[in-house]
Amino acid sequence: MSAIPLLIIQGATASGKTGWAIRLARHFSFEIISADSRQVYRGMDLGTGKDLHEYGDIPYHLIDIAEPGSEYNVFQFQCDCFDSIETIWQRQRLPIICGGTGMYLDAVLSGYRLVAVPPNQQLRDELELFSDNALRQKLLQLKPDQHNRTDLEQRERLVRAIEIAVGEQSAIEDLPPLPKISPRVFGIKWPREVLRKRIAVRLRQRFDAGMIDEVQQLHNAGVAWKKLEFYGLEYRLIAQYLQGQFNQNDLVQKLRSAIGQFAKRQETFFRRMEKRGIEICWLDGEGDVFEELCEIMARR
């Protein structure tokens, strides 16, 4: 089978990548695959920035495919993403992957060899004796390049990440080949101060739209506070606010800071992708991104 042509539009949170991907998909009759680690969950809408109303009749994939409270991971994403790529291509349409979860994007572009790793109770019992810092050091020894900082900050995620890393090491050799792809990667970039303002504006819009109520409703529906905190950023901090750990003004300030730091980590991960040989065509968010994309597409 020949390589499947593939477009990827990536960028930090609030960079506007989804809007540009939708506009491109509508113009060329493409389909969009989301590469966002939290948009897979049903009911987690405002906190993840799904903005489904923007899609209109554009087909999209890997959004609202998992129950809130469950754990969707990079292995599942890679399997589902390659399945979606092949399905879209069989319909003679071009897939566009759009998102900012660097590990998910890299799993496709770099062809991570991943396996499903079941719980290992013996290993968990052994790790129970480790301090949080010792767990962090063990994970970094197994996988030095950690994009998701939450895996380093929450004990439950630390243990599971170590469990996956150990399990993968013993099963990689037996994996079947991945589908061949021919990707073209675009990145949306903004000046740091402009992106910071965009983050603040979008955050306020989400609060006004009922983001706090969304988290409360998820908890009322049976998603534990601990599990909501597991999802990070908006869900972690709003869950803590709803438990009375700080006031709403502190919540806003903490979230603005946390999302800004997250955007920096995203940009750092994209630079690492480039250093490993992935070519990214960066587009100025303040320019005419759509026009540039169309011109580049026409030259292919």
Image (spheres, rainbow, N blue to C red):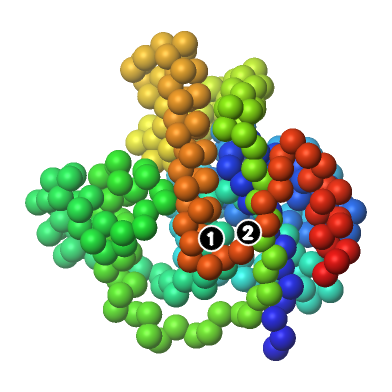
Residue at which label 2 appears: 280
- Crowd around label 2: few <14 · some 14–19 · many ≥20 (10 Å): some
Residue occupying the point 29% across, 42% down:
154
C-alpha gap between disc 2 and disc 1: 7 Å
The x and y percentages for residue 102 are 52, 54
Secondary structure found at label 2: strand
Q: Amino acid at mark 1?
A: Glu
For residue 54, above or below residue 283 = above
Depth check: 192 or 126 in front? 192
Residue at which label 1 appears: 274
The x and y percentages for residue 127 are 15, 56
For residue 111, above or below residue 16 = below
For this orientation, the residue located farthest to the left is: 129
Residue occupying the point 90% across, 54% down:
27
286 left or right of 162? right
Query: Quarter holding the N terminus?
Result: bottom right
Q: Are discs 2 and 1 less than 8 Å apart at CB?
A: yes
